[in-house]
């Protein structure tokens, strides 16, 4: 193999991603705190607790590590319930704490990418019906009107809503997120209101900061019919793909929302993304099952040949990452990879997963994909929602009881990529030697 590195553009963003509830600790005024106190909702009845103790200042340690390891960006979120603990009541100390965090990022050379909504809602929103309530888009707009002037001098990249379809499917179809419903019509209403909230937020940000880059983060789930020769597999695969992957993003182009069995027209959503954020983890094989009416006549499984993560949550399918990037190109805006990573407490699978996925991204860019940044999930182990502390996605490990940070070997691999702004031949040989033939 020729000894040459696979380089990226000089202004490429390399970073990691976090979310407020998962790292801050002691977020006790949102819907997820209520969910965690309900027995059986979280694996092993885990709670976020102190999380990674960011609210008490440990963000400085983790982000200093990130900067020292060559990263030049960081994606994070702010907690709505801290800033607006009661309707129309603002906590200026919380706003100042986030300003200090942003100032700290910039002083470390990290460009902030700020997420306004990452799964959590204030309890008072939850009690009003959450995003099923049409008023929630108005409440969200009021929140955005408050925080954008407070942070606009420090932030150029904004994410309005993280993974709206995951929020919808997990909370209103699968029942794994609060409020734990299985109600497709409510799911449609939540999707519609989140689109309205996104559109309102987009225009509020641009009115205050015309040069801002505003988008949303989409969890792209790669899917493939299990049996290419069997039409019903294609039918259920296409139905799932359209609803999960296309529904929100397509509405931002056409204004036409198509979700499950309902439609609506939301003209204010048209043209409200300056870029698209792509979160990618794995790929499903989809098979028709006439007995699975509750699951819309489908079942999903991983390729039996793929390497599985320690809890069987993720299959290493880099080809799915290439599909995610091709999918994002259909929206004709720049692309930022806003999450990508794997659960791996022993750090055995992560080096191979990381390099093979970065290689697919590099190839896509060579083919013309306008990818401008990559945020690895995550900088440090954190509370993984309904899966609690059973999954470890961090480049750095965490002992939640002692708050000790543990440096994993993947830190050095990602550090090498960030420092060189390239995938080195050495990393390919070390982590993914099967790529040699493709490079040759």
Image (cartoon, rainbow, N blue to C red):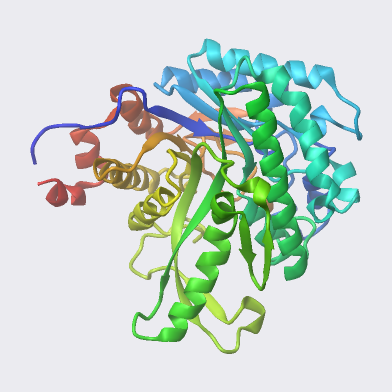
Q: Can residue 183 be seen in this view?
A: no
Horizontal and vertical percent position of residue 294: 67, 79
Horizontal and vertical percent position of residue 375: 47, 35
Horizontal and vertical percent position of residue 357: 34, 46
The residue at 32%/30% (across/down) is 417
The residue at 46%/52% (across/down) is 281
Q: Which of 204 and 221 is in front in this view?
A: 204
Q: Image check: 76 left or right of 396?
A: right
Q: Which of 76 and 156 is in front in this view?
A: 156
Does 315 appear above or below 83? below
Q: Can residue 79 be seen in this view?
A: yes
Q: Image check: 84 left or right of 352?
A: right
Determine the residue located farthest toward the top in the rendered image: 107
Does 119 appear above or below 63? below
Quarter of the N terminus within the rendering: top left
Q: Which of 121 and 366 is in front in this view?
A: 366
Q: Image check: 425 left or right of 113?
A: left
The residue at 53%/73% (across/down) is 239
Q: Image check: 108 left or right of 21?
A: left
Task: Classify residue 411 by image quadrant.
Answer: top left
The residue at 41%/28% (across/down) is 13
Horizontal and vertical percent position of residue 369: 33, 43
Q: Which of 351 and 195 is in front in this view?
A: 195
Determine the residue located farthest toward the front in the rendered image: 267
């Amino acid at each position: 193999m020729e000894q040459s590195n696979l380089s990226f553009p000089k202004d490429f963003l390399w970073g990691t991603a976090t979310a407020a509830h998962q790292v801050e600790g002691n977020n006790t005024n949102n819907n997820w705190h209520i969910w965690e106190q309900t027995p059986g909702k979280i694996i092993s009845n885990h709670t976020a607790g102190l999380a990674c103790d960011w609210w008490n200042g440990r963000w400085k340690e983790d982000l200093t590590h990130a900067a020292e390891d060559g990263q030049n960006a960081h994606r994070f979120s702010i907690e709505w319930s801290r800033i607006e603990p009661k309707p129309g009541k603002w906590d200026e100390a919380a706003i100042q704490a986030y300003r200090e965090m942003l100032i700290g990022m910039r002083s470390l050379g990290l460009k902030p990418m700020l997420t306004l909504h990452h799964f959590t809602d204030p309890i008072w929103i939850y009690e009003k019906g959450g995003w099923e309530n049409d008023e929630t888009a108005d409440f969200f707009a009021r929140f955005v009107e408050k925080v954008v002037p407070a942070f606009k001098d420090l932030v150029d990249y904004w994410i309005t809503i993280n993974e709206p379809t995951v929020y919808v499917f997990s909370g209103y179809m699968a029942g794994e997120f609060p409020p734990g419903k299985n109600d497709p019509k409510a799911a449609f209403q939540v999707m519609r209101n989140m689109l309205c909230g996104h559109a309102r937020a987009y225009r509020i940000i641009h009115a205050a900061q015309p040069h801002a880059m505003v988008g949303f983060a989409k969890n792209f789930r790669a899917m493939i019919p299990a049996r290419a020769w069997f039409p019903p597999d294609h039918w259920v695969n296409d139905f799932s793909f359209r609803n999960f992957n296309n529904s929100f993003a397509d509405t931002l182009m056409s204004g036409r929302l198509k979700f499950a069995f309902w439609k609506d027209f939301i003209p204010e959503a048209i043209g409200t993304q300056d870029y698209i954020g792509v979160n990618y983890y794995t790929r499903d094989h989809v098979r028709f099952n006439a007995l699975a009416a509750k699951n819309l006549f489908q079942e999903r499984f991983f390729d039996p040949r793929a390497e599985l993560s320690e809890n069987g949550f993720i299959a290493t399918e880099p080809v799915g990452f290439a599909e995610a990037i091709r999918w994002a190109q259909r929206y004709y805006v720049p692309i930022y990879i806003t999450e990508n990573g794997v659960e791996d407490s022993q750090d055995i699978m992560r080096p191979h997963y990381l390099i093979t996925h970065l290689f697919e991204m590099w190839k896509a860019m060579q083919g013309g994909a306008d990818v401008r940044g990559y945020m690895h999930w995550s900088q440090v182990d954190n509370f993984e929602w309904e899966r609690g502390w059973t999954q470890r996605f961090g480049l750095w490990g965490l002992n939640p009881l002692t708050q000790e940070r543990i440096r994993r070997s993947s830190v050095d691999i990602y550090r090498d990529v960030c420092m060189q702004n390239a995938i080195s031949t050495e990393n390919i040989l070390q982590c993914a030697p099967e790529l040699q033939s493709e490079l040759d």
